[in-house]
Amino acid sequence: MARRPMAGARHIGHGFFSNKIPGDVNGDGYVGSADAGILNGAYGTWEGDPLYVPEADLDEDGYISSADASVLNGNYGQSV
């Protein structure tokens, strides 16, 4: 599977950078209940599933699982 840049990353020259916190699913600069709600709504989905949300696939393995929830929970309450 090809790797894709982290959601919210911007391309600069030969690479990508992001000031996004892992777990900030909606890209608002804060990891909170809105992000958890999006991840929970997509929980158990995989690439190709109509309910799959790529931004919630925090470990980029193609499946929204407890591993993704762990990333979000580890950064809950953090902001940029």
Image (cartoon, rainbow, N blue to C red):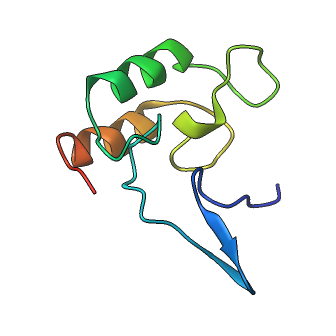
Total marks shown come to 0
Locate residue 36: give its quadrant.
top left
Front-most of residues 26 and 76: 26
| The N terminus, quarter of image | bottom right
Identify whether 69 is placed above or below 14: above
| The C terminus, quarter of image | bottom left
| Residue lying farthest to the left in this orientation | 77
User: Residue 63: percent from the left, percent from the top?
Assistant: 63, 33
Front-most of residues 19 and 38: 19
Q: Residue at x 73, y 58 (%)?
A: 4
User: Residue 79: percent from the left, percent from the top?
Assistant: 23, 50
| Residue lying farthest to the bottom in this orientation | 14
Identify whether 29 is placed above or below 10: above
Identify whether 12 is placed above or below 37: below
Tell me: 1 left or right of 42. Answer: right
User: Residue 59: percent from the left, percent from the top?
Assistant: 53, 50
Q: Residue at x 63, y 65 (%)?
A: 10
User: Residue 6: percent from the left, percent from the top?
Assistant: 59, 57
Locate residue 24: give its quadrant.
top left
Tell me: 3 left or right of 61. Answer: right
Tell me: 6 left or right of 67. Answer: right
Q: Residue at x 75, y 86 (%)?
A: 14
Identify whether 46 is placed above or below 62: above
Q: Residue at x 59, y 61 (%)?
A: 9
